[in-house]
Amino acid sequence: MRKYLYPILLLSFMAAVAALVFFRKPEPVPALKPRHGDLALGGEWVNTQQAVGGLLARLREQPDDTKAQLLLAQAYMQEGRVTGDHPYYDMAAVKLLDEILRREPDNFEALCCKASLSLTQHHFTEGLALAEQAVQLNPNNAFVYGLLCDANVELGRYPEAVRMADKMNTVRPDLRAYARVSYLREIHGDAPGAIEAMDMATKAGVGGLEQTEWSRITLGHLYETTGDLARAEQQYQTSLAARPGYAYALAGLGRIAKARHDYPAAIAHFLKARATVKDYAFADELTDLYRLNHEPAKANAMAREAIKMLATDAKEADDNEQMGHYADRELAYAYLKTNEPDKALEHAKAEYERRPDNIDVQETLAWVHYKRGEYAAARKLITQARRTNSQNPTLLCRAGLIATKTGHAAEGQALIRQALAINPHLSLELAEEGKQLLAGL
């Protein structure tokens, strides 16, 4: 009898596992959350409700409908972009995508969507790996090259990012492809070329759609960065006309008002944007505006709110290797504003360890070292951050300030003047520090 015992036990175990799999109760599909305010107005929200409602009905009847799961995941990813509620919608989407990939590990569209989510959550290494897996399945798809471009940019692999953007434009030149060309031109110091490509992106899109208006806002910000407030304002107003209440267009108008020193108007724009979309950046901007408007209590409250939002995202990322937004770079800047340089350094280093070759990360750590009086370390990092020849005036001004503190006064003076020439409306605190230094030389 004993010789039959192990086979019987093994068969029993396998039957139990099969039963668990077969009779496994599917997890409830996450619901669509209500929109509020301006986001609940217009036909887009009606269409979204109808589309999601139809997909949820399909999944109630056929829980394993892969196509419905994929479409719902894509709808939730878009809803996260529109509302800013990434913690809810990104997690809802990843649950759907994981279910698809559990059954179909080589599902190209699901791999691309999950790669996109990983990039949104700043899990850049994971996003790159997923995109590389996807491109092996379909090397003739433009979108996957966009993902590879984004991942390589964020990891500081700029020549490879350029190569992927070229491939994307070869396969299918469209709004998304032009936008990536614009960003790559910008970080390589070609502001006119960046503006040209982003203008092409906006013209390739349908006015009023979120993707199109995001491109238009980015075009406005390029004008803003180069000191052309009139053209920047025009883009933001056009965007609001096409997509009423668009939070990022309101934020753009807030920055224009700030550059013109109309702080009450700037505050009003950001408060309206913040009431519509969840984005820590609005609280961060309000921190500066309340200080400029001589309201320190409100400034401190906004600074703490920004840190709380970022810290929640960071904890989710630490607890979940797949999801949760890595926010260490943003936290580093936020802690500088609350005069907590040790915490700023902790988070800047964490981001640097994650992606040491990215120029924005190098700039962040350099600036934290500068604020701590660690000028030699700052000099080394800011030199690395300038290797793509970026003409971003904030980067140039910071490089100039760091240069002067390390005995390179002539170089520092030239860089600060270059920054102020590109954008006379540079961040007030930074511009004032630069001007004071120039006056003292």
Image: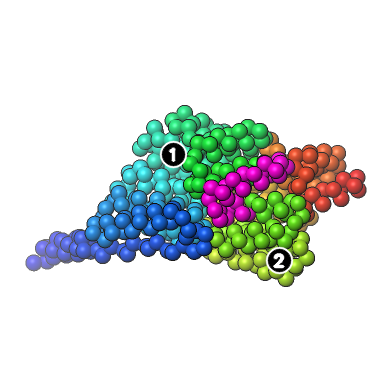
Q: Is residue 44 magenta?
A: no
Residue 435 in the figure: left or right of residue 307 = right
Along the line of sight, which residue is nearer the eye, 45 or 101? 45
Residue 349 location, x and y as percent? 64, 54
Along the line of sight, which residue is nearer the eye, 4 or 295? 295
Residue 341 in the figure: left or right of residue 171 = right
Q: Which residues are magenta?
A: 224-251
Q: Amino acid at mark 1?
A: Phe
Q: CA distance from mark 1 to mark 2?
A: 41 Å
Q: Quadrant of residue 391?
A: top right
Along the line of sight, which residue is nearer the eye, 384 or 282? 282
The residue at the far bottom in this view is 297
Mark 1 — residue? 143
Residue 440 location, x and y as percent? 91, 48
The secondary structure type at the circle numbered 2 is helix
Q: Earlier in the sequence, mark 1 or mark 2?
A: 1
Can residue 335 be seen here?
no
Residue 205 location, x and y as percent? 49, 39
Mark 2 — residue? 299
* Quarter of the C terminus within the rendering: top right
The secondary structure type at the circle numbered 1 is helix
Residue 75 in the figure: left or right of residue 195 = left
Q: Amino acid at mark 2?
A: Ala
Residue 123 location, x and y as percent? 50, 51
Q: Residue at x 40, y 50 (%)?
A: 74
The residue at the far right in this view is 440
Specify few, some or many for label 2: CA neighbours under 10 Å numbering under 14, 14-19, or 20 or more.
Answer: many
Q: Residue at x 37, y 63 (%)?
A: 31
